[in-house]
């Protein structure tokens, strides 16, 4: 594997799941693979899980890890070519990227949608510049349109907890005070569509995801119908994709909050969320604290997904 930015970089999902299981059972078995290899993690946005789990994955593989928060201590980066740089940005990303590439063997990038220009967001301009100009393998730690390490961890978690071969998995929109990207739901949908699961997406009108991510999923606007018989409820807020509301908040309807009443309609479903989660907006205290909540196990599997991917990239370097 050279770069990892979506499920399309995985040749065979079942093989990838087997590899992940092996990595989980043998976390320190490949310490020589990363010896004298440097992993650079670049954050344009905040993070708790991705930062810690990816660092940990690198250490488990024997790598040296460097973390840089672009907005804390680095120079502010100009990202547009052709600009007369007489403003507040002292460095251009076109120099910064190859310089960063010179200091490492693999680069992870977190760069959220900016909601200024939908075309730029959906063309992944920042992530793709890293791929083009760094000279090194690049993996996404959540980019503008996808969060593949999260989705891979989500899939690993569902495989661990599922009680039938093809569980019913429901992705439900839930309210949030601020506009959030579509990356997590887009990516989750893309990975679920690559499985044999029964996959349903439910959200208020106006929150339709981009159609290539929806794929063959069933879209159900009636939230109660969607929950019925579900084995997994995967909650997430996102802002609208469609114009004219791209990246805006058009609903904070708490009827969509995951609560015990709706969970009672399910097949004793497990509750999942990528975290961070706003309690009593996205999910009630009772549901997230219940024995059906597997958000911590899900977050723990972020080490497994990151380590499985890093291992494949390291094998490609050898
Ligand atoms: C981010 C998002 O929704 O994309 C990161 C989630 C992993 N969440 C927030 O900004 C709260
Ligand atoms: N789920 C996730 O990616 O969390 P962070 O934003 O804290 O990294």
Image (cartoon, rainbow, N blue to C red):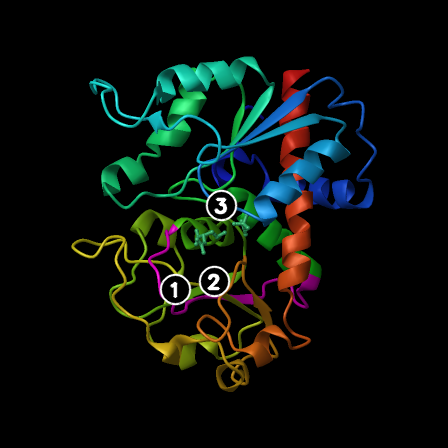
Q: Quadrant of the C terminus?
A: top right
Callouts 3 and 2 close, C-beta under 8 Å: no
Q: Quadrant of the N terminus?
A: top right
Instruction: Judge whether 77 appears above or below 163 on screen.
Output: above
- Front position in the image: 204 or 295: 295
- Front position in the image: 310 or 73: 73
Q: Residue at x 65, y 44 (%)?
A: 53
- Residue 125 at x, y = what percent? 33, 30
- Residue 96 at x, y = what percent? 43, 19
The reply to whether residue 3 is in sight is no
Q: Residue at x 54, y 58 (%)?
A: 275
Mark drawn on residue 199: 2
For label 3, being within 8 Å of ligand 2 is answered yes
- Residue 178 at x, y = what percent? 35, 60
Instruction: Write down the residue under mark 3.
Output: 46
Q: Earlier in the sequence, mark 1 or mark 2?
A: 2
Callouts 1 and 2 close, C-beta under 8 Å: yes
Q: Which label sits in the foreground, 3 or 1?
A: 3
Q: Quadrant of residue 38?
A: top right
Q: What distance separates the C-alpha of mark 3 from that of mark 1?
A: 33 Å
Q: Which label sits in the foreground, 3 or 2?
A: 3
Instruction: Write down the residue under mark 1.
Output: 218
Q: What distance separates the C-alpha of mark 1 from that of mark 2?
A: 7 Å
| Type of secondary structure dominating the magenta stretch | loop
Callouts 3 and 1 close, C-beta under 8 Å: no
Task: Name the outermost residue toward the left.
Answer: 244
For the record, the magenta segment spans: 161-182
- Residue 121 at x, y = what percent? 31, 39
The crowding category of the residue bearing disc 1, from other C-alpha atoms within 10 Å (few below 14, some 14 to 19, many at least 20), is: some
Check disc 3 and report its element: helix, strand or loop. Answer: loop
Check disc 2 and report its element: helix, strand or loop. Answer: strand
């Amino acid at each position: 594997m050279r770069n990892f930015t979506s499920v399309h970089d995985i040749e065979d999902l079942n093989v990838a799941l087997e590899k992940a299981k092996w990595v989980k059972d043998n976390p320190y078995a490949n310490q020589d693979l990363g010896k004298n290899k440097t992993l650079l993690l670049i954050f344009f946005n905040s993070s708790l899980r991705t930062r810690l789990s990816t660092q940990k994955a690198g250490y488990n593989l024997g790598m040296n890890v460097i973390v840089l928060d672009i907005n804390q201590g680095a120079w502010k980066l100009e990202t547009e070519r052709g600009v007369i740089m007489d403003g507040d940005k002292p460095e251009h990303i076109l120099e910064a990227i190859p310089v960063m590439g010179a200091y490492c063997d693999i680069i992870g990038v977190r760069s959220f949608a900016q909601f200024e220009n939908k075309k730029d967001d959906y063309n992944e301009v920042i992530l793709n510049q890293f791929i083009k100009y760094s000279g090194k393998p690049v993996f996404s730690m959540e980019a503008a349109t996808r969060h593949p390490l999260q989705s891979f961890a989500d899939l690993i978690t569902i495989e661990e907890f599922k009680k039938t071969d093809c569980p019913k998995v429901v992705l439900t929109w839930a309210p949030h005070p601020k506009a959030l990207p579509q990356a997590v739901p887009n990516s989750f949908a893309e990975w679920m569509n690559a499985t044999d699961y029964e996959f349903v997406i439910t959200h208020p009108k106006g929150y339709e995801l981009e159609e290539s991510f929806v794929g063959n999923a069933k879209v159900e606007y009636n939230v109660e119908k969607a929950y019925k018989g579900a084995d997994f409820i995967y909650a997430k807020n996102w802002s609208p994709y469609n114009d004219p509301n791209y990246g805006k908040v058009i609903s904070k309807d708490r009827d969509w909050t995951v609560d015990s009443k709706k969970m009672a309609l399910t097949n004793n479903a497990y509750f999942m969320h990528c975290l961070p989660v706003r309690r009593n907006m996205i999910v009630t205290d009772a549901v997230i604290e219940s024995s059906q909540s597997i958000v911590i196990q899900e977050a723990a599997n972020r080490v497994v997904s990151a380590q499985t991917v890093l291992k494949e990239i390291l094998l490609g370097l050898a």
